[in-house]
Image (cartoon, grey):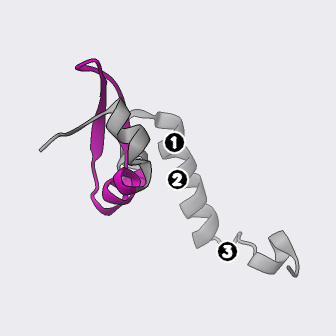
Amino acid sequence: MVKIVKATTLRDHLSDVLKEVSRAKGYFIVTKKGRPVSALVNLDFFEDLLAATSSEYLESIREARADYEAGRVRSHEDVFGEL
């Protein structure tokens, strides 16, 4: 089911809407004056959209998996040092 939220409601209740969209793997359609103007999407959902539509993104995933399997990885300390 598509969830619709008015821009003014989103403005007034952003924290609540963000909590709800982060819980569900989906999206909200944001409307202004009754017309759809944008979408607020869960990050997992957005990544799935990227994966489905971007050959470069899919290639980067393949390269990352190949690096991991070949042992070409770095530890947290290698990258960030001691924090």
The spot of residue 38 in percent (x, y) is 37, 27
Q: Is there a contact, CB below 8 Å, between mark 2 and mark 1?
A: yes
**Above or below — where is 58 with respect to 80?**
above
* Other-residue count near label 1 (Cα within 10 Å), few / some / many at <14 / 14–19 / ≥20: some
* Other-residue count near label 3 (Cα within 10 Å), few / some / many at <14 / 14–19 / ≥20: few
Residue depicted at 31% across the width and 63% down the height: 23
Dot 2 corresponds to which residue?
61
Is label 3 in a helix, a strand or a loop? loop
What range is drawn magenta here? 16-44
Question: Looking at the figure, which quarter contains the C terminus?
Answer: bottom right
Dot 3 corresponds to which residue?
71
The spot of residue 79 in percent (x, y) is 82, 69
- The amino acid type of the residue labelled 2 equals Ile
Residue 1: which quarter of the image? top left
Residue depicted at 37% across the width and 60% down the height: 19
Nearest the eye: 15 or 72: 15
Dot 1 corresponds to which residue?
57
**Structural distance between the alpha carbons of marks 3 and 2:** 15 Å
Q: How many marks?
A: 3
Horizontal side, residue 6 vs residue 83: left or right: left
- The amino acid type of the residue labelled 1 equals Tyr
Q: Earlier in the sequence, mark 3 or mark 2?
A: 2
User: Can residue 1 be found in the magenta stretch?
Assistant: no
